[in-house]
Every structure is written in structure tokens, then in C-alpha cells.
Amino acid sequence: MENKVYKDLTIVVPLYNEEDLLDELYQRLSITVSNLNLDAEVVLVNDGSKDNSLEKIKWICNTNSKFRFLSLSRNWGHQASILAGIDHSYGKAIVIIDGDLQDPPELIPALYEEYKKGFQVVYAKRKLREGESWFKLWTAKLFYRILRTITSIEIPLDTGDFRIISRRVAMHLVGLQERNQFIRGQIAWLGFKTSFIEYDREKRFKGTTKFSLRKMIKLALDGITGFSNFPLRLATFLGFFFTVIAFLLILYALYSKYILNRVATGWTSLMVSSMLIGGIQLLCVGIIGEYLGRVGLDVKQRPNYIVEENSEDVGDQNSI
């Protein structure tokens, strides 16, 4: 990330297969940028879209000089595309906002006003989330409360990536060089003076969410394994607990045979206990494997993303 600053504000927008709402997004972002009365820019990050999103993005950038684009070599994921936009921004402050219009661009001036009070991070906290299923609302609520319980950092509840951060925070964030990104957690881990504003999150303007259940689970695993060793401690506890249970069962079997002169019976209980212990062992191995897999990715030091094309026509050399 360059230290040179050319703009007052950069707005980073990750996009994946959003051609149906790009016209509306462009219109609302253009009005927002004009109303800011700042030297601002918008960086549209095409995360390997398979529809006509890139063509529309190029048209927008050719039409309005305040818009720039990055097109990644493939679909690297939501968090990686955010990081790419931050890494290629020129603003003293950087806004992160999704391109599905659930987070209203009209809230950006309010974020900036709060930021000017001296805060390094100002996040948008959701009061209401329209257009989302009870399952997604319930699982998201449960996840963030579990994460807050098992980690030593305070990750704000009921928030996403919609926020404004200072360039100082952005430089530290890019410098972390982690392969499994959980940006809202990483920003909280960095510390710095933080504030928030509340808003009602809108339903999608058009189309369906690109954040599938599989992607939600991956993000949750990245958040838990990136900021807590609790699963490893749980695996240790379960191993110790069932070792004690097995030892007690051995003592009971010996007592029954040599003191009570009867053979302990119970094929069903034996099979159930064996299956249970085997399942716990596999669970613990899986937990350890998740952590080792993430360590392996960090050791390889592969880039978080590769830019195939951008407004400056630099090509695929712009990667970290």
C-alpha cells in the first residue's frame, strides 16, 4: 500500500455478478460523492464476475473520472476483494461498502462526519435488517455473540464491513498479510479509537445474495480460528474428559470381574460409547486440521489476490 495520498476519501465497493444493479449503484454513489464536496474517488472491485459486470464497470469508469476499477484474475472472495480495493486506494480515509445496496451509500456523509471528530474507525451498526430470512438473522446473531465470548477482542455486534477507516488503520490492515481474511475482526484487533452510527439495513435492490451458506460457514471459521484458540482448548478438554470416563469404565470392569465375580455385559452400551469416543476423536482431529491448514496457507505466502486489469492498465503486477 502506497504512502502517497492524493484524495480526501476513497470508497471501496467489492462486486461479484451484480450487473443488474450497477446502474442504480452508480447513480446513488455519484450523487453521494457530489454531495460530499470532497476530493473523493470510488474504486469498483470486480471479483471475477461471470456476467457482464466488468463491461458495465468499465463504462462507468470511462464516463466518470471519479470512478476507478480493479478486475481480479478470478473470484478470490469478498474479503480479498475488499483488501484489494483498500490496497489500491489513494484516500486519507477509506469507506468499505458492499455493492448490493443493502448498505445505503447515502449514509457515507454521516460516517465521514463522525470520522472527522477524531475517530480512526467508524462502523455502521444495524438496527433493522430487512429482506433477510430468520435463519440468517438467527445464525448471524448467534455467531457474533459466540465470537465475542470466546475471543479476547471486542468485535462489535450487529455490524458488517460497512465502515470508514483512516489510512493509518488501512496500512496496518494490509500489513497483516493473513491468507484467511476476516476484516471486521482484524480491524477490531488493531484497536484504535472507534465510534459507530446506527442505521436500518435495506433489502437487496435487485437479484439474490451471492453470500451462500458455504461462504458464510467459511467466514465464520475464519473468524473463530483467526481470533480464538478456544476450539483447540475444547478439543483438549474433551480428550481429557473421555480419557477419565474410559479409565473409570476400566476400573468398573475389573471390579465386576475380580470382586463381584461377574462379567460386565452390555454390547449396546459398548458400541455406543465406542462410536461416541471415535466421533469425538475425529472432531478433535478436524479442529486441529483447520488450524494447521490456515498455518500452512500463511507459510506459503501466496498473494491474497491478483489484479488482472485495472484503470491504470498496470496489469497483474499489482498484487500483494
Image (cartoon, rainbow, N blue to C red):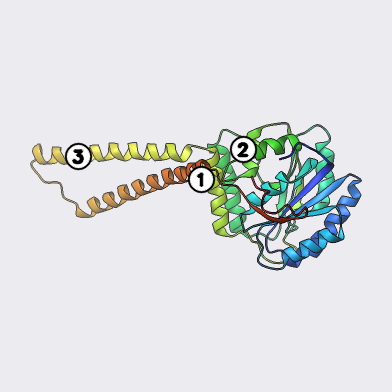
- Can you say whether 20 is above or below 8 in the image? below
- As shown in the figure, which amino acid type bears the numbered disc 3? Ile
Frontmost residue, 102 versus 135: 102
Question: Alpha carbon of mark 2 to alpha carbon of mark 1: how far?
Answer: 14 Å
- As shown in the figure, which amino acid type bears the numbered disc 2? Leu
Q: Earlier in the sequence, mark 2 or mark 1?
A: 2
- Position of residue 279 measured from the top left corner of the image (x, y, whole percent): 34, 50
Q: Which mark is residue 250?
A: 3
Determine whether the residue tagged by mark 3 lies in a helix, strand or loop. helix
Determine whether the residue tagged by mark 2 lies in a helix, strand or loop. loop
Q: Residue at x 37, y 40 (%)?
A: 238
Answer whether labels 3 and 1 touch (C-beta < 8 Å): no
Assess disc 3: are there few (<14), some (14-19) or many (≥20) residues with their C-alpha within 10 Å of its C-alpha.
few
Horizontally, residue 278 falls left or right of residue 171, namely left
Q: Circle 2 sits on which residue?
A: 176
Q: Which mark is residue 297?
A: 1
- Can you say whether 260 is above or below 202 in the image? above
